[in-house]
């Protein structure tokens, strides 16, 4: 039905033109060209053939343009993909490099820390060995036992706040039956104070039996000559003979003398600088009777100056009062009373001296 086909092709063309559907115009023009060719209407057939050919050329050009655009777009996408891949590889390389650097650095730091820790432990062990050796040396300088006498009850006590302390006591018996009771305290703590104790011990053994104040004068010159800087040695000496004591002190706490007859305690205070201070320092000599029931107490400042939890020291007056009430006991029991009282005062706190 050619007439109907022509009619509907024209209707289709008019709709297609409004929609700008090039493909639809091509199909309609090809159909009309074929119809007019079949009807042998050459002009119309040529007309629509020309239209369809023109459209094919346009579509061909557009296809080529699209193809070129697609090629360009694909090339751009490939380049972009290459760039992204290169950036990803670069990030991966950088990340791996950073990881390697961080890991290698961490390993170096770890090894150094381990090495330092190992060296620290070796050094700490070396210092501990030195401290143990110094403590053993210090303890070897102290008398192994107190003098055994029928007429005297003698007891001693020492407790260091550190591995090596500066406190020192000794007994030097003499051929005439008397003996020197010595109590000392080097300034500070540790190995240097232990050295001062050693020097003091050696100096005492090299000095003849003289009055306590003369011994301190000679010992002072020995310590001064060694010259340990600011290190000093406080020391008191009590020469104990039949019914008499002679005492002299170089900057030590008071010596306490309890007299049984009067039931009283005397604080024997001596003037004088510690050993190692002034080269020609003079020391005072004090003489007292020493009779049955009397008690002599020599001590360092670690006991009367022990602090409690609030920092208040035990105090010399409290110590004197306690001595007053405990001198009817044995020498060992007197020491136990004093130490127990001070420990209760400190309430478990470490004594710094």
Image (cartoon, rainbow, N blue to C red):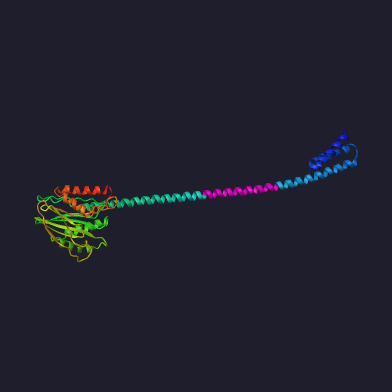
Q: Which of the 4 image quadrants contains residue 31?
A: top right
Dominant secondary-structure state across the stretch colored magenta: helix
Residue at horizontal 86%, vertical 42%?
48
Horizontal relation, residue 174 to residue 307: left or right: left
Q: Which residue lies furthest to the top in this view?
A: 1
| x and y, in percent, of residue 151 in the image | 9, 51
Q: Is residue 23 visible?
A: yes
| x and y, in percent, of residue 163 in the image | 27, 51
Residue at horizontal 24%, vertical 47%?
344
Residue 72 painted magenta? yes
- Quarter of the image that includes the N terminus: top right
Image height check: is 1 above or below 65? above
Horizontal relation, residue 117 to residue 229: left or right: right
Q: Give the range drawn in magenta.
A: 71-96
Q: Is residue 142 visible?
A: no
Question: Which residue is more in the foreground, 259 or 59?
Answer: 259
Horizontal relation, residue 294 to residue 9: left or right: left
Question: Which residue is more in the foreground, 269 or 212?
Answer: 269
| x and y, in percent, of residue 311 in the image | 29, 53
| x and y, in percent, of residue 306 in the image | 25, 52
Residue 319 painted magenta? no
Callout count: 0
């Amino acid at each position: 039905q050619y007439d109907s086909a022509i009619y509907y092709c024209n209707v289709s063309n008019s709709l297609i033109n409004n929609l700008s559907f090039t493909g639809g115009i091509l199909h309609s023009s090809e159909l009309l060209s074929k119809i007019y060719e079949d009807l042998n209407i050459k002009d119309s057939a040529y007309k629509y053939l020309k239209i369809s050919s023109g459209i094919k050329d346009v579509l061909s050009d557009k296809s080529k343009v699209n193809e070129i655009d697609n090629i360009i777009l694909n090339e751009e996408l490939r380049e972009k993909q290459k760039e992204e891949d290169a950036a990803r590889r670069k990030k991966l390389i950088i990340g791996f490099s950073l990881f390697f650097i961080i890991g290698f650095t961490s390993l170096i730091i770890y090894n150094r820390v381990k090495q330092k820790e190992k060296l620290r432990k070796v050094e700490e062990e070396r210092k501990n060995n030195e401290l143990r050796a110094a403590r053993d040396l210090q303890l070897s300088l102290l008398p192994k036992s107190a003098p055994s006498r029928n007429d005297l009850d003698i007891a001693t006590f020492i407790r260091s706040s550190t591995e090596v302390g500066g406190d020192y006591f000794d007994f030097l018996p003499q051929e005439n039956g008397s003996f020197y009771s010595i109590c000392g305290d080097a300034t500070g703590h540790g190995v240097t104070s232990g050295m001062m104790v050693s020097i003091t011990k050696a100096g005492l053994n090299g000095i003849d039996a003289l009055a306590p104040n003369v011994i301190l004068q000679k010992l002072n010159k020995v310590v001064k000559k060694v010259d340990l800087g600011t290190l000093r040695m406080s020391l008191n000496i009590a020469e104990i003979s039949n019914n008499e004591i002679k005492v002299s002190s170089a900057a030590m706490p008071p010596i306490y003398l309890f007299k049984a007859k009067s039931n009283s305690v005397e604080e024997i205070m001596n003037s004088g600088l510690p050993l190692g201070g002034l080269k020609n320092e003079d020391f005072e000599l004090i003489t007292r009777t020493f009779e049955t029931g009397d008690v002599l107490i020599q001590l360092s400042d670690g006991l009367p100056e022990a602090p409690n939890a609030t920092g208040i020291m035990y105090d010399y007056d409290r110590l004197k009062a306690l001595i007053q009430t405990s001198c009817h006991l044995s020498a060992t029991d007197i020491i136990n009373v004093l130490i127990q009282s001070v420990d209760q005062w400190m309430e478990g706190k470490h004594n710094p001296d």
